[in-house]
Amino acid sequence: MLYSEKVMDHFRNPRNVGEIADADGIGEVGNAKCGDIMRMYIKVKDNIITDVKFMTFGCGSAIATSSIATEMIKGRSIDEALDLSNQAVVEALGGLPAHKIHCSVLAEEAVKAAVKDYYDKNGIKYDCDKYAAGSCPCVHEHDSLN
Ligand code: FES
């Protein structure tokens, strides 16, 4: 089968879908090639992500990866969220076909963009090294290839 049961489950019943009106951080990322867009909302208290929601306009894998990414960072610290890699997302989903790996990259980028927004809003300095090469939102804004 092309997709694991876990992918199908998160695609059919995505967790944490929606918006957070008073979000502490919002990250929006897109992939210019496929046109998919992902928006991630986080609430943060004492450095812990207390709530997270997402809106994804894109393929089934993009929905599944963003759904599981919200589960993986909810209740975790900001640092743990920044450590979330797209590989971890793929593993948690029981794998993705090679041509769908970029969808998981979008999920990682969306989480990081939301954290960056939180940092920016609160004047917190962040370390660009925390962002995977090419996925740091600062780079992202100037990188039309992404
Ligand atoms: Fe581009 Fe899935 S096809 S994010």
Image (spheres, rainbow, N blue to C red):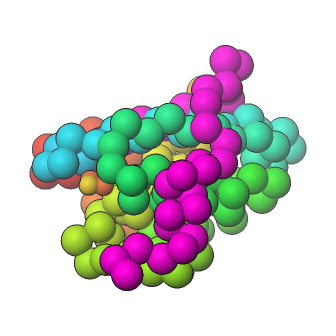
The range drawn in magenta is 1-30
Q: Residue furthest top?
A: 21
| Lateral position of residue 110 relative to residue 145, left or right | right
| Lateral position of residue 42 relative to residue 31, left or right | right
Q: Quadrant of residue 138?
A: top left
**Residue 139 image offset from top left, x and y in percent:** 29, 49
Q: Residue furthest right?
A: 46
**Residue 98 image offset from top left, x and y in percent:** 26, 78
Could you tell me if residue 85 is visible in this image?
A: no
The residue shown at (66%, 48%) is: 15
| Lateral position of residue 61 relative to residue 84, left or right | left
- How many numbered marks does the figure carry? 0
The residue shown at (57%, 71%) is: 6
Q: Nearer the viewer, residue 90 or 145?
A: 90
**Residue 125 image offset from top left, x and y in percent:** 58, 44
Could you tell me if residue 101 is visible in this image?
A: yes
The answer to whether residue 95 is above or below residue 84 is: below
Q: Nearer the viewer, residue 37 or 11?
A: 11
Magenta highlight on residue 71: no
Q: Residue furthest front?
A: 1
Q: Quadrant of residue 38?
A: top left
Q: Nearer the viewer, residue 18 or 49?
A: 18
The residue shown at (61%, 50%) is: 13
**Residue 9 image offset from top left, x and y in percent:** 58, 62
Q: Quadrant of the N terminus?
A: bottom left
The answer to whether residue 130 is above or below residue 22 is: below
Image region (quadrant) for ligand 1: bottom left
The residue shown at (32%, 70%) is: 101
